Amino acid sequence: MRVLGIETSCDDTGVAVYDTAGGLLAHAVYTQDQVHAEYGGVVPELASRDHIRKLLPLVGSVLLQARTRKEQLDGVAYTAGPGLAGALLVGACAARAMAFAWRVPAAAIHHLEAHLAAPLLEEDPPAYPYLALIASGGHTQLVAVAAFGDYELLGESLDDAAGEAFDKTAKLLGLPYPGGPALAALAEKGRADAFSLPRPMLDRPGLDFSFSGLKTHARNTLHAQKDENPSVRADLACAFQEAVVDTLTRKCRRALRQTGLHRLVVTGGVGANRRLREVLAAMVKKENAAVYYPRGEFCTDNGAMVAYAGCQRLLAGAKDGLAVAVRPRWPLENLEKPTD
Ligand code: KG4
Ligand code: ZN
């Protein structure tokens, strides 16, 4: 089965072709970072307009790269939610129209299911069942994955997502958008012990997270500096990163112990963080577990994970109707299991 995948849930236009026999045939992501940079965050209306401009040319070039004619496609998969309503609608309308014109089924994909499937595109994919940490700009969730489509939410952030906390703290430190990678780079130059930031919710049982207090703490610490010397921002970036990484790692360890699972999958933009990968590697070694990641470019939003999830859903017989419907809010627990 060969499927075209389309991702437009936020500020990345992602397109890919995945084939169950040949693997990933081609993929491309156009990122709107420059469009939003001057506003310091994603402007939904600008995101929708840019998806409109970029999506169809990207589909054309990815099909060409994949040496795939439209007659060779067995379906079109698109992200139907959660995400920005206007941005989602661009992908949904285009995907539905193409599927209709090419007389193939379309599959509406849950963005987090796609992130959960991203490590399965790699050469040494994890076997089911596994524990997954989704840490992106919009979500921080711990999920027990029994099989494709079979998810149990174990815990999530009660306020800001980890990536959102990175982005907001980066802005506070005067770093350019998107803040996560910029803060991580600055943190490399800082000292971890110069400031100590709290580890939210670690003293409480359970697997939920809270990151908004951390960001406030970082702000208060910065404002309390009377004579700011140049290393303060790097030290604070480092202390912030350590606090997030430590919190995520300890909750992952708690979840591994609680579920008895031995495989941990980390996905979403924050999964690209080098320090997080280093600390998680040491933790899983001690726990006799293994950790799996998508390659860096598939940690953040992309079409490949959508095409892959689309193949799985379409193979199980998924078919959505002709109406174009998106679900900006769509809890993972409400996702239907695929049937075959
Ligand atoms: O998964 P993603 O592309 O988009 C959402 O679905 O939200 O994740 C983007 C998020 C942003 O908040 C970005 O700052 C963060 O992931 N991010 C990072 C790094 N790379 C991306 N955060 C920390 N360290 C990184 N290296
Ligand atoms: Zn995402």
Image (cartoon, rainbow, N blue to C red):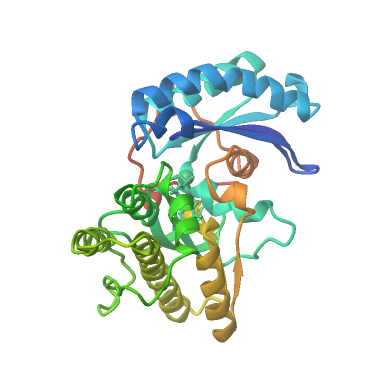
At a point 81% along the width and 27% down the height, the residue shown is: 67
Q: Nearer the viewer, residue 233 or 293?
A: 233
In the rendered view, does 118 fall on the left or right side of 269?
right
Coordinates of residue 198 in the picture (x, y in percent): 27, 73
Residue 139, relative to residue 301: is it above or below? below
The answer to whether residue 97 is above or below residue 238 is: above
In the shown orientation, is residue 173 left or right of residue 6? left
**Residue drawn where x is 50% and y is 48% of the image:** 113
Report x, y in % for residue 152. 42, 62
Q: Is residue 192 at least partly visible in the picture?
A: yes
Which quadrant does the N terminus fall into? top right
Residue 131 appearing in the image: no
Q: Residue furthest top?
A: 101
Going by the image, does 244 lie left or right of 19? left
**Residue 240 falls in which quadrant of the image?**
bottom left
Residue at image coords 47%, 31%? 34
Examine the rendered structure and indicate whether residue 145 appears above or below residue 94: below
Residue at 42 percent of width and 26 percent of height: 47
In this figure, what is the number of numbered marks?
A: 0
Residue 337 rendering spot, x and y as whole percentages: 49, 49
Q: Nearer the viewer, residue 257 or 26?
A: 26
Give percent across and percent down for residue 33. 47, 34
State whether residue 75 is above or below residue 215. Answer: above
